[in-house]
Image: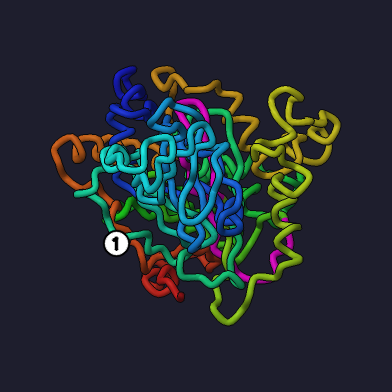
Amino acid sequence: MLSQEQNQALTAIGPGTPMGAVFRRYWLPVVLADELAEPDGPPARVRVLGEDLVAFRDTTGRVGLVDAFCPHRRAPMFFGRNEECGLRCVYHGWKFDADGTCVDMPSEPPDSLFKTKVTIASYPTWEGAGMVWAYLGPAAEMPPPPAYELTRAPATHRFVSKTRESCNYLQAFEGGIDTAHISFLHNMKLGDRRNPRALDTSPRLEVEKTAYGFRYHGIRNAGDDEYIRVYQYLMPAQQCRGLIIGYSGEQVPVPTMNGHIWVPIDDTHTFVYNYIYSADPEIELPRDWIIDHEIHSGRGPDDLNPDFSLKKNMSNDYMIDRNVQKTRTFTGITGINTQDYALQEGMGPIVDRTREHLGTTDRAIIAARQLLLEAIDDVSAGRRPRGADTTACSDVRATDLLVPKGDPWRESLPTLTRARF
C-alpha cells in the first residue's frame, strides 16, 4: 500500500513533476517510424509527458520534434508545410529546421535579423527498431541512444505496433509485470489440463534488482516439471519476456522475444509500444504470422481506431460475451491486450493505491515502485537514474523454461538471457 503522496509522485508525469523529471532522463519512443513514412511528408501530432509537439521527417530523412505551436503567434504547426529541410508555419511563413532554428522569416524585411533571435522548442530524436525515440531532458544529462537487443534486430526479424490506452501509465505498466494475472485474465481455454499457467495459479516470484531495473522469475508447478518465465524490467516502464516454450494460447512458429514500452501521453492516457522479434538470428519473423499474432493480441488491422485506441473499449464493455465467459474463456473478452485494457482502464484514470492490499505474487510490482521512487530521489539529487544509460541492459533478454523439478536452471540463466543480436 502506498501513501497518497507516493501515489501522486509516481503517477503525475507533466512538466515540473518529480516523475516527469525521471521520464525525461530516458529515451522514449514517440511515434512509429511508419507514421512519418517519407521525407517532406505530412507531420504527425505528438503528445508525450503532457507536452504537445509535432514530428516531421525532413528532406534528408531526419526527424524533427518541435513545439506544436509557432513561437510567432502560437499557430498550430501541424498544418505546416514540410519542405526543403524545414517545417513552415502556414500562418505567416516562418520556417524552422529539425533543430528548432528559424531558417526563414518572409513576413519580415529582407535585411531583418529577427530570425536569428527566434527559435522553436525542439528535442533530439533517434530512429531505431521501427520507432522514433526522443530525449526530452536536460542536454547535459542526455544518455547514449537506446542499445536494447530489440534495436539491433533487423527489420526482417522484428515487428512493432502501438496502441492507445485511457489510463495512467503506472497501472498499465504494472499489469505488464504482473505474472500471476495470466492464470486468470488470459485463460483462453477453461479446463485445459496441459497449461501450467492455468493449473498453478499462485506462482512463486523471485526478484533480483539489476543496474537497469530487475530480472524476475515466475515459477509454476507443472506435474513433475516446473514452468519458469524469466522477465526483464527495463526502467522506466518497459517489460521483456520470452516465448520459447509457449503456453500462450496461439501457435508460435519461431521462438520470440516480446514486450511493451509504456510511454505516458499525459496523466490519464498512455501509448503502449508493442514489440516482438525472433529469438534466433538465423530465423526471420514470418510476415503472415505477425498479423495473426496481432489479432490474437486484440490489436489487428480491424481492431484499432485511427488514433490507435481499441474499437472494443469501455463504451461497449469491450464486447464481452457472457456465454463465452461461462463456457470457454475466463473473461469472455476476445484479445489478450483487450482483456488487459478492460481491467486497467476499468480501474479508473488513476488508481488510488492507498486502498490496495498486495499479496505474495505482487513482489515485482512492489519492487518496481521502489525503483521508481528511488529514481525520483536520484534525479532530485542530480544523479543519473538507474537504467537511463541502456548499455547496462544491451546484452540481456528474457526466456521461459520447462524443466524437471530440482533442475539447477538458475545456473544456465546467464547464457539463456544473453542477447544474440
Percent coordinates x, y for residue 190 in the rendering: 76, 43
Residue at x 29% of width, y 37% of height: 114
Q: Is residue 413 above or below residue 337?
A: below
Depth check: give the residue in front, 228 or 371: 371
- Circle 1: residue type: Ala
Element carrying mark 1: helix
The residue lying furthest to the right in this view is 323
- Check residue 258 for magenta coloring: yes
Q: Which residue is drawn at 43% across and 40% down?
A: 106
Query: Residue visible at 46% across and 56% down?
Result: 85
**Looking at the picture, how far across and down is residue 41, in whole percent?**
60, 52
Residue 13's x, y, as percent?
Answer: 37, 30
Residue span colored magenta = 250-273
* Of the pair 246 and 4, the residue shown nearer to us: 4
Task: Indicate the quadrant containing the N terminus: top left, top right, bottom left or bottom right.
Answer: top left
Color encoding of the figure: rainbow
Q: Is residue 302 left or right of residue 8?
A: right
For the question of whether residue 235 can be seen, the reply is no
Q: Which of 103 and 166 is in front in this view?
A: 103
Residue 335 image point, x, y percent? 72, 43
Q: In which quarter of the image is residue 409?
A: bottom left
Q: Is residue 330 magenta?
A: no
Residue at numbered disc 1: 392
With 250 as the anchor, is 109 left or right in this view? left
Is residue 405 visible in the rendered image? The answer is yes
